Image (cartoon, helix red, strand yellow):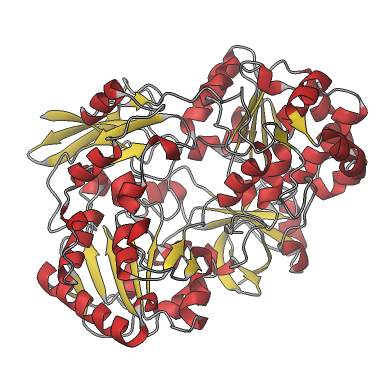
Amino acid sequence: MTIIRSVCPYDCPDTCGLLVTIEDNRVVRVVGDPKHPITQGFLCPKMTHYEQTVHSPRRLTTPLLRIGGPKGSGSFAPISWGEAVGRICERWQGLMSKFGGESILPYSYAGTMGMVQRNAGHPFFHYLGASRLDRTICAPAKDAGWKMIMGETAAMQPSEMLASDLIILWGLNAAATSIHAMRDALNARKKGAKLWVIDTYHTPTTEAADEVFLVKPGMDGGLALAMMHVLVRDRLVDMTFIRDNIFGFEEFAQTVLPQYSPQAMAERCGLPDAVIERMARSYAQAQAPFIRLGSGLTRYGNGAMTVRTITCLPALVGAWQRTGGGIFLSTSTGSAFPLSKVTREDFCRQPTRLVNMNQLGDALTNLSDPPIKSLYVYHSNPAAIAPDQGAVVRGLLREDLFTVVHERFLTDTARYADIVLPATTSLEHEDLYRAYGSYSVQVARAVIPPVGEAKSNWEVFQLLARGMGWNEPFFAQTGSEMISQLLTEENSWRDTVTNSRLLAGEPVLLQVPNEAKQNWKTPSGRIEIKNERETEPLPRLLPTHAEEDGFPLRLQSAPNRYALNSSFYERDDLRQKQDCMQLLMHPEDALKRSLNNGQAVLAINNLGQVQFSLKITERTPPGTVVSEGVWWREFVPGEYGINALMSQRLTDSGRGSTLYDVTVEVRGM
């Protein structure tokens, strides 16, 4: 047996270090790496048996060609890689000659987070002249809201949570999506810190909290404004810090905050005004209050403004000047690596149109001049995860849409493909990974040969480049050479020692620039509560989209600790722990509708209807229903999954998804 270091490749802030045991070219065990500086050997339930994903009997091992029947029926026959590449390139060349390169659309997101494999398609499709994909399904509104206040200021060290006396997990189900933040919060609590959780329903994270505050979906910004109203009214702000560090405070305090008293916000937020008053005073009295902000609260029509508003809180009380105080959203390490050496935007000979990935359904069914005639999907599953699933499926059913899917499993999207290409897992290819919940980075090499005929993203795009007849030397590089290019330029984040350790496969921490919590990298050099470059110069409460939809129940699509978006549904053991696709509903709402626990129900809105098994529980407040996980259609009780109810509408800034900005009615079947 051999034990080799590796990295979790999934879209999670922690990027855990792994120790992988290999025997006879098979993965027999996966555990956490105790020497990883952040994750320290602790893994989530999904990765503790990653070998079951790597060697799943569901793995695709050869290219497949659709051989008949309607799209989606899953009728395929094996073909060779040579035939697959030849068919793809021939079809694309024909489409380009008739409709132009923009008739081809790539679709990818975060099925792998490695810098090479995740971005491997960018240079290919730039060179091809294809339509570009606006990759904004997760939380771009979060980044936009932060930048409106803090500009390019680096994120604080998340480990400072351990020095805080009041930790607020706001819109973050850390037990499911950020387990090492949860670990640090619990360790700080053992040392005396108070732990608050602010969310829309009782998640597993709330079980560990000292206090839980449930807000109405999309109203987190209203809560923050009401708290700041109290801080200013009762003179609980740090005027010295404000004078030296903040731009626009006086106007904000005089013209905006008077509208948002706790009494005015109580009903809209779903919290009694006395509770809001107490929250504000406790926040001000804490020596080093620390907010860890999740992404879910950004997936509304007011998502960026919500983040912008909450980000003002630590500034008003001067929390930034104390160890353990501040707010953490995510790390941004883009300047640590010259990613343009991989993405090669310079290959774009001329600007091509930008298609937002949240509006794929509209792009496939309505876009013209030219229409989308081919879709190439890699490390993503849009038939399950994209908003307005019904529209996406209608587009995928088009016989004139040539769809190619590069995947490990026959996912919802792969079933609609004309050609399916088998993909490697992260243990079968090499890559460079960086966390976004810490400043850790690590190189992972292939630890086993590819399963069957599986190929990595980069290998496939090399084959396609040759098939298209291109002689561009860039596409002749190996994955290792691409990684080396990312490490060639030293900068303030990395030095020679760091690079050598990375190439040896060690997990290392980047050297955080000095400006974090010290120098505000904004145009004014101050924290900009007032941002004159924005249409809305000052933070305020914006409405959500769903407030106008007219259905009585707010639907929350929440993460499940045994899945990650639509990943891991190939695993029988993890599916069984989720039980089935359930809709959580408060007893009062069930009684009003004469519904019973375990009953089959339909959630309905203007986009469609989805079947669930009803679970009556007080985990959800009245007026809110919740479904956890994004199930494959193979395992849902009805025809569609939860995203059939999600709109293609975008956030107020950042062009992000509004997957949580949904209302429904529920009725029995």
| Residue located 36% across and 49% down the image | 340
Viewer-side residue, 314 vs 455: 314
Q: Quadrant of residue 202?
A: top right
Residue 565 spot, x, y in % from top left: 45, 52
Q: Quadrant of residue 250?
A: top right
Q: Is residue 634 above or below residue 423?
A: below
Relative placement, left or right, of 28 versus 186 is left
Viewer-side residue, 115 vs 42: 115
Q: How many marks?
A: 0
| Residue located 56% across and 25% down the image | 515
Q: Is residue 18 above or below residue 289?
A: below
Res. 49 in view? no
Viewer-side residue, 430 vs 565: 430
Residue 496 spot, x, y in % from top left: 28, 23
Residue 509 spot, x, y in % from top left: 38, 24
> Which quarter of the image is occupied by the N terminus?
top left
Relative placement, left or right, of 649 versus 573 is right
Res. 465 in view? yes
Relative placement, left or right, of 164 versus 38 is right
> Which quarter of the image is occupied by the C terminus?
bottom right
Residue 446 spot, x, y in % from top left: 18, 41
| Residue located 53% across and 76% down the image | 362
Q: Quadrant of residue 442?
A: top left
| Residue at the farthest left position | 24
Q: Is residue 336 above or below residue 372?
A: above
Viewer-side residue, 164 vs 256: 256
